[in-house]
Image (cartoon, rainbow, N blue to C red):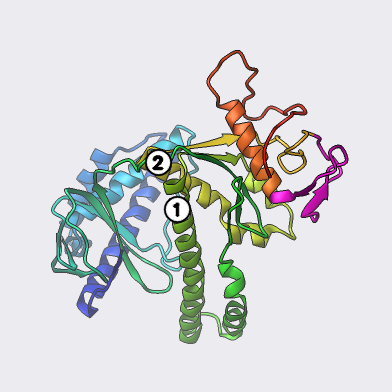
Amino acid sequence: MRIKPNSAQRKLLESHFGANRWLWNYFLEKRKREYQEHRKNSTYLRDAAELTKLKHDGEHEWLNDTSSVSLQRTLRHLDTAYNQFLKRLLRFPKFKSKKKNHKSFTLAGSIKIRGKRLVIPKFSEGLKFNRPLPTFAKINNVTISCSKSGKYYASLSVEAEVCDLPKTGSDVGIDLGLKCFAVRSDGSSLESTRPMKFYEQEMRKAQQHLSRKKVDSNRRQKQRAKVAKIHEKIANSRNDFLHKASIATIREYDTIYLESLVIRNLQKNTKLRRFIDDAGWYEFASKLDYKAKWYGKEVRKIGRFYPSSKTCAYCGFINQRLRLNEREWKCPQCERILDRDLNAAVNILAEGRRNFAPAMGENRRGDGVRPRQLTVEASV
C-alpha cells in the first residue's frame, strides 16, 4: 500500500533507511573479515550484543534515533542470508548501496491501523495511507520501502482467513502467446495490454533526455526519477492486468492446465525477448498457482516437450514442419484448418486430463518426457 508521509516523517524514514543500510554493510564486512582471517562465523546473538555497544560508544549514538526493532530485523535478515550462503543455497550477500536505491526496513511488534493511518514505533502520529485499510486480526510485520521514483510504500504481512471459491465443475487448457496473451480451450481469449509498447515513445524520449544530462548533476537525478516513474507505470499496468486475468480464471475454472515453459530459454531469441518480457508469462503462472491454493482450485502443468501447437487435435498428426509465423495450418491427414493457439489449448487440456487422470490402468506420462503421437477427440 502506498503511504504519504509529511516532510518530518520523510526525514525520519530516510534516517531509518540509512541506518539499516549502514548496519547491514557494517556487520557483513565484519563477518567477511572474520571468516577470511580466522575462519570463524559470527551469529545473530553476537551481532546483537555488539549493536548494543555501538549505541553507547559515543560515535554511533545516532543509531538510537532509529527503531531498535528495525535494526534487529536487519541483523536477522543478514544472519539468514549469510547462513544460506554457507549452506550453498544462495550467493554471498551483497553490500547495499545508496545509489542503487536500497531503501527499506522491516518492523514487527506494536503495529496498529487507525483508519487511514499506520502507527509504528518512532512514528506516533502514524503514516497516512492513500485509502482506508480493513482491520486485520493480526499483523506479523510491516516493511517500509521507497521506490526509485520517490514513492513510499508499506507492505503488510498479516494473518487472514481465506475461504474457498464455489466450484464450477469445469477445467480448461491455456496456451500462452505473444499475439494473444492467453487462448483457452473453450474458445475464449485474453488480450494483453502490452504496457511496454504503450509507453514506448514516452520512454524513448525520457531516456534520450537522461543521456544528455551531466553525470552526478541535479538535473540528471531529476530526469532519472522521471524515467523511474515511467518504468513504474509499466510495471503497475502489467501487474494490474495479470492480477485481474488470474483471479478471473480462478473464479471460472476448477482445474487449469498450463505448459511448463522455460522462460530463460525462450528469451535467448533476441527478436522476441522484449515481447516475452512484456507479456509476463512467469508472473501469470505464479499468480495462478498461489491463488489456486488460496481458493481451493488446482493448477497443473504438462511436460515441456509436448508438441501442443504441432499436434492436430482431431487426428493426432504431428506437423514437424510448422513454423513460428504460421498462425493457421492445414492438417495433411484430416485436411482440417486449425488455429495454432486454439489447437494448442485444446491439446493442453487433453494432455492434462490424460496425465492427471486417476490411475485406472492407463499409461501416464510425467513432466520432461517426450510424448509419442497421440489421438485426441476434441472440438476446436
> Between 328 and 302, which is closer to the camera in this rendering?
328
Q: Quadrant of residue 261?
A: top right
In the rendered view, does 222 fall on the left or right side of 268? left
Q: Quadrant of residue 26?
A: bottom left
Element class at badge 2:
helix
Q: Which residue is mark 2?
A: 82
Q: Main secondary structure of the magenta part?
A: loop
Which quarter of the rendering shows the C terminus?
top right
Q: Which residue is mark 1?
A: 248
Look at discs 1 and 2 and give the one toward the viewer: 1
Please tell me whether residue 252 is drawn above or below residue 63 in the rendered image. Answer: above
As drawn, the residue found furthest toward the top would be 361
Please tell me whether residue 104 is drawn above or below residue 336 in the rendered image. Answer: below
Which quarter of the rendering shows the N terminus?
bottom left
Q: Give the magenta part as a residue range.
A: 317-341
In the rendered view, does 86 fall on the left or right side of 130? right
> From this viewpoint, is residue 324 visible?
no
Other-residue count near label 2 (Cα within 10 Å), few / some / many at <14 / 14–19 / ≥20 = many
| x, y percent for residue 367 | 62, 29
| x, y percent for residue 239 | 47, 60
The answer to whether residue 363 is magenta is no
| x, y percent for residue 56 | 15, 56
